[in-house]
Image (spheres, coloured by chain):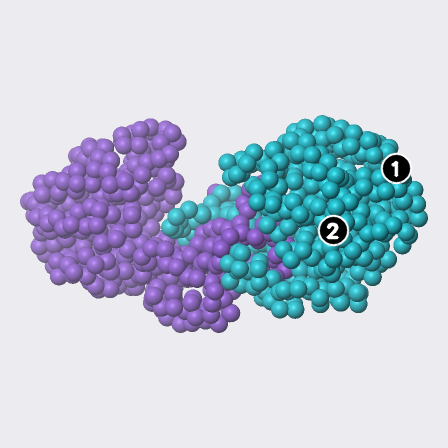
Chain colours: A cyan, B purple
Amino acid sequence: MTSPHHSDLSAHIARGLSDLAEFVAIESVSAQGRMLPEAAAYVTRLLEAEGFTVREYPGTVAPVLVAEAGSGPTTLLIYNHYDVQPEDPTELWDSPPFALTEREGRLYARGVSDDKGEFISRLAAVRAVRERHGGQLPLRIRWLLEGEEEVGSPSLDAFVEAHADELRADGCWWEFGSITPEGRPVASLGLKGVMCVELRCRVADSDLHSSLGAVIDNPLYRLARAVATLRDDTGRVTIPGFHDAVRDPSPADLAAIATIPGDGQAVRDTYGVTRPLATGPDYFRRTNLLPVVNVNGWSGGYQGEGSKTVLPAHGSVKLDFRLVPDQNPEQILALLRAHLDTQGLSDVEVVELESHQKPARADAGHPFVVACLEAAREAHGLEPIIHPSSAASGPMSPFNEFLGVPCVAMGIGNLGGRIHAPNENILKVHFEKGVAFGVALLERLGRGL
Amino acid sequence: MTSPHHSDLSAHIARGLSDLAEFVAIESVSAQGRMLPEAAAYVTRLLEAEGFTVREYPGTVAPVLVAEAGSGPTTLLIYNHYDVQPEDPTELWDSPPFALTEREGRLYARGVSDDKGEFISRLAAVRAVRERHGGQLPLRIRWLLEGEEEVGSPSLDAFVEAHADELRADGCWWEFGSITPEGRPVASLGLKGVMCVELRCRVADSDLHSSLGAVIDNPLYRLARAVATLRDDTGRVTIPGFHDAVRDPSPADLAAIATIPGDGQAVRDTYGVTRPLATGPDYFRRTNLLPVVNVNGWSGGYQGEGSKTVLPAHGSVKLDFRLVPDQNPEQILALLRAHLDTQGLSDVEVVELESHQKPARADAGHPFVVACLEAAREAHGLEPIIHPSSAASGPMSPFNEFLGVPCVAMGIGNLGGRIHAPNENILKVHFEKGVAFGVALLERLGRGL
C-alpha cells in the first residue's frame, strides 16, 4: 500500500464536488426547520451506496443517523452534522447561498465548510479506500450525523449516552478542523465548556426620578459590583473555588501549545484590538487552557441619545463562562451563587439561559491522536499544529464522558471561511487535501493503533 | 390692612382661572419650538395690564422677559417660565392636554402646574394687592420669565450674570412649590446641582466571538469595575476628594430637616421599592444634603432574548451626579477622571453629556426665608414644611451666585400632580391657596424685611 496522491484521487474528488453541489442545494436550516428530512435522506442514500447500514432515530427537530460499515483492528467514530445556519442576510452574498459557486479557487455556499464540505470530503475518502480494498473497508467506521448542531445539539448528549454500545470506538474524528494559509493542518483535541447566565436586579416596580438615588438603591450599580467581583484586570476569574477542578495540562499538551506558531497578532489586526489580555507565549496558553467569564451584554435604564435622569427599576447582565476540564457547569453555577451571597449581593438573581455544555479535552499523547497526526503529516506534507483545546465550545463532552474516546478535530476550514456568515467558503485545494487526509487516516487506522 | 381671606379674593381667583384656561391653550412646547413667541406675548400683555414694564431679550430658543413694577422697602424677584413639556403620549390623557378641564376638584392641562398655574396664581395675587393699594404695589417686583426651562435653561446662567443689576433683589420666589394632602405648604430653599456624564470603553473595532475573551479584554467588565468604584453599598460616593467641598448644613437647616414629617414610606409604597437606602430620620437628611451618583442606564453587546456568545467591541454607561453646595461640577469632573486613572481605568473615557447645573441653597434662617414662612403660616393656617434643599436639580445657582439672593420655592403643586406626564393637574383649592399666599407674601414684604 502506497500513500495516496492527488492523482489517484482526482475521480473521487470530482465526484465529491458533484455531491457537494447537490448537498448544499438542500436548504437544511435547522433554526427554521427547513428541509431536514430531505437532507437526512440524502446523507442516508450516499452512505448506503457505500455499504453502510444506516439507522435513523428521532431527534428534537431532526433525525439522528447512525451508520456503520467495515471491519478491522480499529473502530473509528466520525461525527458530522447535516444542518446549516440560516443564510440571511441574503443580500450580502455574492452568489446564491444554496448554489455551489467557484470563484478564484474558492467554493462558496451555505454549509460548504460547516459542515457539508467536511462530510463529503470524508465520504470521498471512504470511496477511495473501498476502491483500493476491493470494495471493503480495512476498519470499522461508525458515523454519527445529527441535524441539530446549529441549534445547540439538544438531543446529542442523551443520545450518545443511550446509544453508547452502538457508538463505541477507538477514537472520534470531530466534525470540523482547519488548514492554515501555509497549508499546515490544525488539530484541536478539545473544546471548552460553556454556560450562559443572566444576572438580574430589581429595586422597584417602576422607574423613578434619579433624585431618589439618595434614598433608593440602584440596580445597575448592584449589577456592576457583581460583575466587577467576577474577574480581575488580568482576566482571571475570582469566584472562590472556580479553579479547584481545573485539570493540570499534560506535558504533551504543554509541548503542543509551545509549538503553535504566532501570538494572535492576526486576530488583533483583523479586529483592531486595543486591549489585548495576552500576547506572546501566553496567548495560546490562554485560548487553550484558561477558563474565563465574558460579559456579553447588559440592559437597563435609558440608552438613547444624551442624558435622562432616571433611576431604573431593574437591569440585567448577560454572561458566558468558558470552562475547561474538569470544571462542571452545575458546580460553577453553585459557586457563582455562593460568591454573590458572600459579596452581599443576594438580591442579584442568577438565571441560566440555556443548557450548558461541559468541557472536553483529549491528551495530545493518546495513540489515536498520534495516529491522526501521522496521517496529517503524510497527507499534507507539513507538521500539524496541535491545540489541546479550541477556545470555543461544542457538544464534545458526551463522547469523552460516555464513550471514553478522544476526539480529534481536523478538517478543511480556513480562517477566512466565514462560517455562519454570508459568503461561507472553502478553498478548493483544501477540499482535495481533506480527501487525501481522509484516505491517509483510514489507511493508518486500518493498520491498527 | 387685614390679612387676606378667600372671600376677598374670589373675583381674582375666578379671573385667574379664566387667564389660566387661555394660557394653557397656547401650546408653548420648548422642546419642539412650538408657540413660544405667542406665549411670551401673552405673558407680556398680562403683566403690562398690571402696570409692569416688560423688556424682552433674545434667548436660545425663546425670549427672556424681565418685568418690573412697584416700589417700596423690599424688592422681590420672581422666577417663572412660560414653556411646557411635550404632551405625548397624548392617548394617555383623559382630556385634551391643552384644554383646561376640571374634574373632581382638580384642574387638568399640560402646564397647569408646571409652570403656568404658578405664574397665574401669582399674577392674581398681584392684582389683588394692587386693588387694595389703590393701583400701586407696596414693594418692587422684578419678574423674570424664560421660555427654555424645559430644555435645560441654556441661556439663564449667562443672562442672570449679564443682567444682575436689572434683577437685583432681596430674595427670589422660585417657580415651583407644593402643598401636602393635609394642606401644609412645603418650602424648598435649595436645589442640588446635576452633572450628566457618559463613561465609554472600547476594546476593538467590531464585536468578536466571546471565546476570544480569554485573550482580549471586555469593555463591559471595564465599565462595571469603574461604576463599582464610584460608590459603596450605603450609597456614599467613594471618589477621593468628592466630599471635600461639601458645605456643613447650618443649625437652621438641620432643625428644619428634623421636623419634616414622614420618612418616605409613601414613595416606597407608590413605587414598590424593595431596596431603600434610608428610612427613618436618615431619609430627609439624605434627600436634602447627600450628594449622590446615579447610574441612569447602560448599553453594549447583546440585549435580546436568550444568550449570544459575543465579546462586545464597546459599551457605555450613563451617570448623573447630584451635587450639594459648594461642590463644583467642573472640579467633580476632574476628580472623576483622576479617580479612574488611579484605578487603572485610563481607557474608560468620560464625556459630559450636557451643561451641568451647580448646587444652590439658602440658609433656613435668612430674613427673606423667614418672611416667606410667616406669609405661608398666615395664608395656609398651618406650619410650613421646610426642605433646605430639594433632592432634585434646577437652574437656581446663578441667582445665589450672581445676585446673592436666597431662593424660596413655594407654590401650588401636589404629590399626584403628574408634571411632565399625562394628566398633569393641580387641586383647584391649591390654586386658591396659592393666590392667598401670594397676597400674604407681597403684603409681608411690603412691610420690609
Marks counted in the figure total 2
- Front residue of A34/A113: it is A113
- Residue at 36% x, 68% y: name it: B331
Would you place residue A135 above or below residue A352 in this image? above
Q: Quadrant of residue A148?
A: top right
Where residue A29 appears, x then y in whole percent? 65, 33
Same chain for the residues under marks 1 and 2 in the image: yes
Amino acid residing under circle 1:
Gly
Residue position for label 2: A410
Q: Quadrant of residue B77?
A: bottom left
Q: Is residue A319 left or right of residue B126?
A: right
What numbered label is drawn on residue A135?
Answer: 1
Q: Quadrant of the C terminus of chain A?
A: bottom right
- Residue at 67% x, 60% y: name it: A287
Where residue A119 appears, x then y in whole percent? 74, 40
Q: Residues within 10 Å of mark 1 (few under 14, many from 20)?
A: some
Amino acid residing under circle 2:
Met
Would you place residue A39 above or below residue B198 in this image? above
Where residue A63 appears, x then y in whole percent? 76, 32
Q: Residues within 10 Å of mark 2 (few under 14, many from 20)?
A: many
- Front residue of B160/B176: it is B160
Q: Could you give the CA–CA distance between mark 1 and mark 2, rounded to whole angstroms?
A: 26 Å
Would you place residue A218 above or below residue A131 in this image? below
